C-alpha cells in the first residue's frame, strides 16, 4: 500500500472509531454490573413491550396507508391528463415547504375537536400520506413509456389493472425507498406522538424512552440497555438494506 | 369519454388529498389565523390584530431562543460541511473498506434522536461520565457540559481576566454540547451527499488538471471545489433549515422545565412547544410559528433561486 493510502485508511479508521464510540460505550455500560440482566430489568421496569407494540402498530399501519394513497395519487399525477392537475400537484408540493413544528399547535386543536387526542387515530391518520413519496413515485411513473400503457390497454387491462400489474411491479426500487423512508420516519418520530398522546397505554417507543430517561436519570445501566434495544430493530433493518438506504438518502436529499 | 373515466383521475388523488387538506393545508392556514387571535387555555375570545407579534418583539425570552438558535446554526452548519467534505474526499474512488466506513458513519443518521440523546446525556455526565473520565485521565479539569450555563468565550477568556457579557459570552457550554451531538448525528448524511456530488464531477476535468500539472491542492481549489459548489450550497441550506428546527435533542438532553441551564439551550422550536403545550398559549405560539415559517421560507426560496437542482433520479 502506498503511504497516501495508508494515511487515508488511518484517518478514516480514527474518524470511524470516534463515530462508533458512543455506541460502544452504550453497549458496554448496558452490560456493567447486572450484565444481560440489565436488559430484562429495563424491559420490565416500564411497559416497553407495550411501547414496542404501539410503535409497530403505528409504523405498519402508517406504511400501508402511505403505500396505498401514494401509489394512487402518483399514478394520477404522473400518467393522466385532466384539468386542474398541475394546480392540485402544486397544492401538495407547497405543503412540503412548511415544516412540522409550524403547524403542530393548530393540528393539536383540530385533533382535539375531532376527539382524537390520545388515540391511535391521532398517531396514524395524519401521516397516511406523504407528499415527498408521491413526488418520488410520480417522477418515476412519468418515465414509463406510453406504449406500455397502450399495449396493456389492448390486452384488456383496466386503468387500475395497469397500475397494479404493470406500473407498480416496474417501480420496486422507488417503492423500497419510500418504504425505508417511512419506516425510519415513523419509528423515530417523537414530537408528534409526544404532543398528541398522554396515556401510557398509547405511548410509542421514543416517547416511552424519553420518559424512562427522566425517571431513571441516575440508572445508567438500565438507560443504556433500553437505548440499545430501542435502536436494535432499525439497526438490523439498516444493516440489511444498507446499500439501498444510503443510496436512497443520497439520491433524494431528504432527512428525517 | 365516459363520465367514470373523466372523474377517475380525481378519485385516485382523493385519499391523499383529504389527508393533505385536513392535516396540512388547514392547520397551516389556521396557524396564520390563530396568530391574530387570543386563543388560549380558555378558548377563542377574539381577534387582537398584531398584538401577539408586538409581544413577540418585546419578549426577551423569545429573543433569547432566537439567539440560541442562531448560535446553534452557526456552530453546527460549518462543521457539518467541513467534516463531511473531508470524509467524502477520503472515501471517494476505489478504497478498501469503503462500505464498512460508510456504514459506520451513517449509523447515527438512522438512530433515533431520542436514543442518541439518552446515550450522549450519559457520556456528558459531569460525575462519572466517560468524557470527563477521559479528560481527568489526560490531566484536565472535568467540565459540567450539559449543565454549564456559562458561555464558552466567557469560560475561555475569564482566566485571562476578560469578562465578556451577554451575547459576547458566546453560546453556553450546554448548547455547545448539543451542537457536538447534532454534528455527530448528521455527519454521515452530509458525507453521502458530498460523495454523490463528487461522483457527478466528470473525470475529464481531473485529467485536464493533471495535464496542466496541477497539484493535489490546486486540483481541489480549481476543479473539485467550484464544481462541487451546487452540492455544498444544497448541504448548507438544508443543514440550516434542519438546525433551525432542533427539538428532540434539547427536550431530552436538557429536559423540561427550562430548556437547559438558565434557558441557555432554549431554541425557537422548544420555546414554541412550551408556549403551545405547557401554557396552551396558542395565539402567541402561532405568531412564533409564523416567524419560524418566514425564516425557513426565505431559506427555501434562496435554495430554489440560487441552488442548481441537484436531485437526481437514476
Image: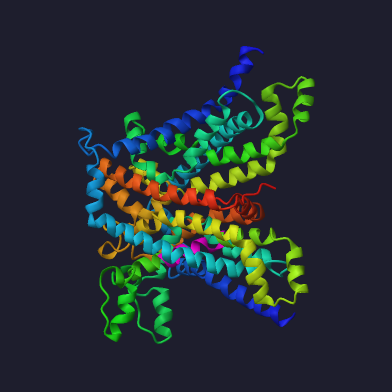
Q: Is residue B169 left or right of residue B17?
A: left
Image coords of residue B270 (percent x, y):
33, 53
Q: What colour scheme has been applied to the protein in the rendered image?
A: rainbow
Q: Residue furthest front?
A: B212
Is residue B184 found inside the magenta-colored segment of the image? yes
Please provide the residue range marked out in magenta.
Answer: B179-189
Is residue B36 found inside the magenta-colored segment of the image? no
Regarding residue B307, the answer to whether it shows in the image is yes
Say which quadrant the N terminus of chain B sits in: top right
Name the foreground residue: A201 vs A109. A109
Secondary structure, magenta segment, majority class: helix
Q: Is residue B197 left or right of residue A166?
A: left
Q: How many marks?
A: 0
Where residue B170 sits, quadrant-wise, is bottom left
Q: Residue furthest top?
A: B2
A179 lies above or below A237: above
Tell me what residue is drawn at x 39 percent, y 77 percent: B132
Image coords of residue B209 (percent x, y):
73, 71
A116 lies above or below A212: above
Regarding residue B254, the answer to whether it shows in the image is no
Name the foreground residue: B226 vs B127. B226
Tell me what residue is drawn at x 57 percent, y 52 percent: A253
B69 lies above or below A127: below
Image coords of residue B34 (percent x, y):
29, 37
Image coords of residue B140 (percent x, y):
38, 84
Amino acid at each position: 500500500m502506498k503511504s497516501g493510502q495508508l494515511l487515508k485508511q488511518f484517518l478514516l479508521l480514527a474518524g470511524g472509531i470516534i463515530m462508533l464510540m458512543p455506541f460502544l460505550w452504550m453497549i458496554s455500560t448496558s452490560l456493567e454490573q447486572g450484565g444481560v440482566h440489565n436488559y430484562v430489568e429495563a424491559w420490565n421496569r416500564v411497559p416497553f413491550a407495550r411501547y414496542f407494540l404501539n410503535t409497530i402498530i403505528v409504523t405498519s399501519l402508517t406504511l400501508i396507508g402511505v403505500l396505498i394513497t401514494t401509489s394512487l395519487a402518483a399514478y394520477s399525477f404522473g400518467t393522466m391528463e385532466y384539468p386542474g392537475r398541475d394546480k392540485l400537484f402544486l397544492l401538495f408540493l407547497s405543503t412540503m415547504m412548511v415544516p412540522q413544528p409550524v403547524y403542530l399547535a393548530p393540528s393539536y386543536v383540530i385533533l382535539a375537536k375531532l376527539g382524537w387526542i390520545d388515540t391511535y387515530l391521532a398517531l396514524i391518520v395524519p401521516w397516511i400520506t406523504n407528499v415527498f413519496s408521491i413526488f418520488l413515485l410520480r417522477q418515476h411513473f412519468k418515465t414509463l413509456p406510453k406504449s406500455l400503457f397502450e399495449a396493456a390497454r389492448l390486452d384488456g387491462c383496466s386503468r387500475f389493472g395497469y397500475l397494479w400489474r404493470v406500473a407498480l411491479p416496474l417501480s420496486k426500487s422507488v417503492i423500497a425507498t419510500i418504504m425505508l423512508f417511512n419506516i425510519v420516519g415513523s419509528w423515530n418520530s417523537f414530537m408528534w406522538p409526544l404532543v398528541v398522546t398522554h396515556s401510557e397505554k398509547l405511548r410509542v417507543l421514543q416517547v416511552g424512552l424519553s420518559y424512562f430517561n427522566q425517571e431513571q436519570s441516575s440508572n445508567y445501566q438500565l438507560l443504556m440497555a433500553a437505548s440499545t434495544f430501542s435502536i436494535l430493530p432499525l439497526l438490523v433493518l439498516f444493516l440489511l438494506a444498507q446499500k439501498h438506504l444510503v443510496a436512497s438518502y443520497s439520491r433524494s436529499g431528504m432527512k428525517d | 369519454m365516459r363520465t367514470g373515466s373523466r372523474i377517475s383521475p380525481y378519485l385516485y388523488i382523493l385519499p391523499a388529498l383529504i389527508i393533505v387538506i385536513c392535516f396540512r393545508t388547514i392547520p397551516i392556514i389556521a396557524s396564520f389565523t390563530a396568530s391574530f387571535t387570543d386563543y388560549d387555555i380558555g378558548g377563542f375570545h377574539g381577534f387582537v390584530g398584531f398584538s401577539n407579534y408586538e409581544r413577540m418583539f418585546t419578549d426577551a425570552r423569545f429573543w433569547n431562543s432566537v439567539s440560541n438558535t442562531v448560535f446553534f446554526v452557526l456552530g453546527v452548519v460549518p462543521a457539518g460541511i467541513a467534516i463531511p467534505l473531508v470524509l467524502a474526499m477520503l472515501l471517494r474512488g476505489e478504497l478498501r473498506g469503503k462500505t464498512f466506513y460508510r456504514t459506520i458513519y451513517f449509523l447515527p443518521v438512522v438512530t433515533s434522536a431520542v436514543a442518541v440523546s439518552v446515550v450522549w446525556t450519559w457520556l456528558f455526565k459531569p460525575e462519572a461520565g466517560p468524557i470527563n473520565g477521559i479528560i481527568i485521565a489526560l490531566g484536565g479539569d472535568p467540565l459540567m457540559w450539559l449543565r454549564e450555563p456559562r458561555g464558552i468565550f466567557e469560560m475561555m477568556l475569564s482566566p485571562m481576566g476578560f469578562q465578556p457579557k451577554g451575547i459576547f459570552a458566546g453560546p453556553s457550554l450546554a448548547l455547545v454540547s448539543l451542537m457536538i451531538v447534532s454534528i455527530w448525528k448528521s455527519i454521515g448524511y452530509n458525507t453521502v451527499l458530498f460523495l454523490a456530488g463528487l461522483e457527478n464531477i466528470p473525470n475529464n476535468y481531473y485529467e485536464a488538471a493533471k495535464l496542466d500539472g496541477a497539484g493535489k491542492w490546486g486540483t481541489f481549489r480549481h476543479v473539485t471545489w467550484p464544481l462541487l459548489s451546487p452540492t455544498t450550497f444544497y448541504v448548507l441550506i438544508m443543514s440550516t433549515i434542519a438546525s433551525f428546527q432542533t427539538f428532540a435533542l434539547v427536550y431530552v438532553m436538557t429536559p423540561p422545565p427550562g430548556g437547559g441551564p438558565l434557558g441557555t439551550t432554549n431554541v425557537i422550536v422548544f420555546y414554541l412547544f412550551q408556549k403551545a403545550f405547557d401554557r396552551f398559549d396558542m395565539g402567541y405560539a402561532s405568531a412564533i410559528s409564523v416567524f419560524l415559517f418566514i425564516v425557513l421560507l426565505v431559506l427555501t426560496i434562496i435554495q430554489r433561486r440560487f441552488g442548481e437542482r441537484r436531485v437526481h433520479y437514476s
